Image: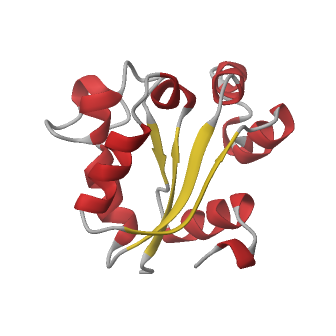
Amino acid sequence: MTNRTFTMIKPDAVENGHIGAILDKITSAGFKIIAMKYTQLSKRDAQEFYAIHKERPFYGELVSFMTRGPIVSAILEKDNAVDDFRALIGATNPAEAAEGTIRKLFAKDIGENAVHGSDSDENAAIEGAFHFAGREIY
Protein backbone atom coordinates (compact mmCIF):
# COMPACT_ATOMS: atom_id res chain seq x y z
CA MET A 1 0.00 0.00 0.00
CA THR A 2 1.38 3.38 -0.97
CA ASN A 3 0.44 6.72 0.46
CA ARG A 4 -0.29 8.45 -2.85
CA THR A 5 -3.24 8.61 -5.20
CA PHE A 6 -4.15 10.53 -8.33
CA THR A 7 -7.26 12.58 -9.02
CA MET A 8 -8.74 14.77 -11.70
CA ILE A 9 -11.50 17.29 -11.21
CA LYS A 10 -13.36 16.66 -14.45
CA PRO A 11 -14.66 19.25 -16.96
CA ASP A 12 -18.22 19.20 -15.58
CA ALA A 13 -17.11 20.15 -12.07
CA VAL A 14 -14.71 22.80 -13.42
CA GLU A 15 -17.49 24.29 -15.61
CA ASN A 16 -19.85 24.37 -12.63
CA GLY A 17 -17.38 26.25 -10.42
CA HIS A 18 -16.72 23.44 -7.95
CA ILE A 19 -12.88 23.43 -7.94
CA GLY A 20 -12.55 25.25 -4.62
CA ALA A 21 -15.25 23.25 -2.84
CA ILE A 22 -13.80 19.93 -4.05
CA LEU A 23 -10.26 20.90 -3.05
CA ASP A 24 -11.59 21.92 0.36
CA LYS A 25 -13.25 18.50 0.80
CA ILE A 26 -9.97 16.81 -0.20
CA THR A 27 -7.75 18.79 2.16
CA SER A 28 -10.31 18.68 4.99
CA ALA A 29 -10.20 14.86 4.71
CA GLY A 30 -6.48 14.96 5.49
CA PHE A 31 -5.01 14.69 2.01
CA LYS A 32 -1.92 16.73 1.20
CA ILE A 33 -1.70 18.02 -2.39
CA ILE A 34 1.85 17.29 -3.59
CA ALA A 35 1.27 18.15 -7.27
CA MET A 36 -1.52 20.03 -9.02
CA LYS A 37 -2.19 21.66 -12.37
CA TYR A 38 -5.02 23.27 -14.29
CA THR A 39 -4.88 22.02 -17.86
CA GLN A 40 -6.91 20.64 -20.73
CA LEU A 41 -6.45 17.16 -22.13
CA SER A 42 -5.83 16.84 -25.86
CA LYS A 43 -7.81 14.19 -27.70
CA ARG A 44 -4.62 12.08 -27.96
CA ASP A 45 -3.92 12.41 -24.23
CA ALA A 46 -7.49 11.47 -23.30
CA GLN A 47 -7.41 8.47 -25.65
CA GLU A 48 -4.14 7.31 -24.11
CA PHE A 49 -5.20 7.93 -20.51
CA TYR A 50 -8.44 5.97 -21.01
CA ALA A 51 -6.98 3.32 -23.35
CA ILE A 52 -8.10 0.62 -20.89
CA HIS A 53 -11.69 1.44 -21.95
CA LYS A 54 -10.98 1.51 -25.72
CA GLU A 55 -13.23 -1.45 -26.50
CA ARG A 56 -16.09 -0.24 -24.30
CA PRO A 57 -19.14 1.36 -25.93
CA PHE A 58 -18.74 4.59 -23.93
CA TYR A 59 -15.08 5.21 -24.92
CA GLY A 60 -15.74 7.87 -27.60
CA GLU A 61 -18.18 9.71 -25.37
CA LEU A 62 -15.69 9.58 -22.49
CA VAL A 63 -12.88 11.04 -24.63
CA SER A 64 -15.19 13.81 -25.90
CA PHE A 65 -16.31 14.66 -22.38
CA MET A 66 -12.79 14.71 -20.93
CA THR A 67 -11.52 17.02 -23.69
CA ARG A 68 -14.41 19.49 -23.75
CA GLY A 69 -12.90 21.79 -21.13
CA PRO A 70 -10.20 22.23 -18.52
CA ILE A 71 -9.48 19.80 -15.71
CA VAL A 72 -7.52 20.00 -12.47
CA SER A 73 -5.17 17.06 -12.02
CA ALA A 74 -3.46 16.34 -8.70
CA ILE A 75 -1.39 13.84 -6.80
CA LEU A 76 -2.53 13.45 -3.21
CA GLU A 77 -0.70 12.03 -0.22
CA LYS A 78 -2.15 10.40 2.90
CA ASP A 79 -1.89 7.04 4.65
CA ASN A 80 -4.11 4.55 2.78
CA ALA A 81 -4.56 7.18 0.07
CA VAL A 82 -6.23 5.12 -2.67
CA ASP A 83 -8.90 3.50 -0.51
CA ASP A 84 -9.54 6.62 1.57
CA PHE A 85 -9.92 8.76 -1.55
CA ARG A 86 -12.27 6.26 -3.20
CA ALA A 87 -14.42 6.46 -0.07
CA LEU A 88 -14.32 10.27 -0.13
CA ILE A 89 -15.43 10.54 -3.77
CA GLY A 90 -18.19 7.92 -3.54
CA ALA A 91 -19.68 5.53 -6.08
CA THR A 92 -19.15 6.15 -9.81
CA ASN A 93 -22.91 6.69 -10.14
CA PRO A 94 -23.71 9.70 -7.91
CA ALA A 95 -27.25 8.35 -7.40
CA GLU A 96 -25.62 5.45 -5.50
CA ALA A 97 -22.96 7.54 -3.74
CA ALA A 98 -23.07 7.98 0.02
CA GLU A 99 -24.27 11.29 1.46
CA GLY A 100 -21.49 13.83 1.84
CA THR A 101 -19.22 12.26 -0.79
CA ILE A 102 -17.81 14.44 -3.57
CA ARG A 103 -19.85 12.74 -6.28
CA LYS A 104 -23.07 12.93 -4.25
CA LEU A 105 -22.50 16.66 -3.77
CA PHE A 106 -21.13 17.72 -7.15
CA ALA A 107 -21.80 15.12 -9.88
CA LYS A 108 -24.71 15.14 -12.31
CA ASP A 109 -24.76 11.51 -13.42
CA ILE A 110 -22.61 8.44 -14.07
CA GLY A 111 -21.10 10.03 -17.21
CA GLU A 112 -20.41 13.44 -15.69
CA ASN A 113 -19.33 12.40 -12.23
CA ALA A 114 -17.12 15.36 -11.20
CA VAL A 115 -13.90 13.57 -10.23
CA HIS A 116 -11.60 10.70 -11.07
CA GLY A 117 -9.81 8.70 -8.40
CA SER A 118 -7.24 5.97 -8.99
CA ASP A 119 -8.55 2.47 -8.28
CA SER A 120 -5.24 0.91 -7.16
CA ASP A 121 -1.77 1.85 -5.96
CA GLU A 122 -0.36 0.69 -9.31
CA ASN A 123 -2.76 2.85 -11.31
CA ALA A 124 -2.17 5.82 -9.00
CA ALA A 125 1.54 5.68 -9.86
CA ILE A 126 0.87 5.25 -13.60
CA GLU A 127 -1.74 8.03 -13.72
CA GLY A 128 0.36 10.42 -11.65
CA ALA A 129 3.36 9.86 -13.93
CA PHE A 130 1.15 10.42 -16.99
CA HIS A 131 0.22 13.92 -15.80
CA PHE A 132 3.29 15.06 -13.87
CA ALA A 133 7.03 15.07 -14.42
CA GLY A 134 9.06 14.18 -11.35
CA ARG A 135 10.13 17.81 -10.89
CA GLU A 136 6.47 18.85 -10.56
CA ILE A 137 5.85 16.68 -7.49
CA TYR A 138 6.63 18.22 -4.11
Q: Residue 124: x, y in percent?
A: 55, 65
Q: Residue 12: x, y in percent?
A: 50, 24
Q: Residue furthest right?
A: 44
Q: Identify which residue, 56 or 18, lies in the foreground.
A: 18
Q: Residue at x 32, y 74 (%)?
A: 80
Q: Residue 3: x, y in percent?
A: 42, 79
Q: Is residue 24 left or right of residue 111?
A: left
Q: Is residue 123 left or right of residue 59?
A: left
Question: Where's the C terminus, which quadrant?
Answer: bottom right
Q: Is residue 88 left or right of residue 40?
A: left
Label count reads: 0
Examine the rendered structure and indicate whether residue 128 appears above or below residue 38.
below
Residue 16, located in which quarter of the rendered image?
top left
Q: Residue furthest left?
A: 99
Question: Where's the N terminus, which quadrant?
Answer: bottom left
Q: Identify which residue, 107 or 122, lies in the foreground.
A: 107
Residue 11, located in which quarter of the rendered image?
top right
Q: Residue at x 80, y 43 (%)?
A: 45
Q: Identify which residue, 64 or 11, lies in the foreground.
A: 11
Q: Residue at x 47, y 73 (%)?
A: 4
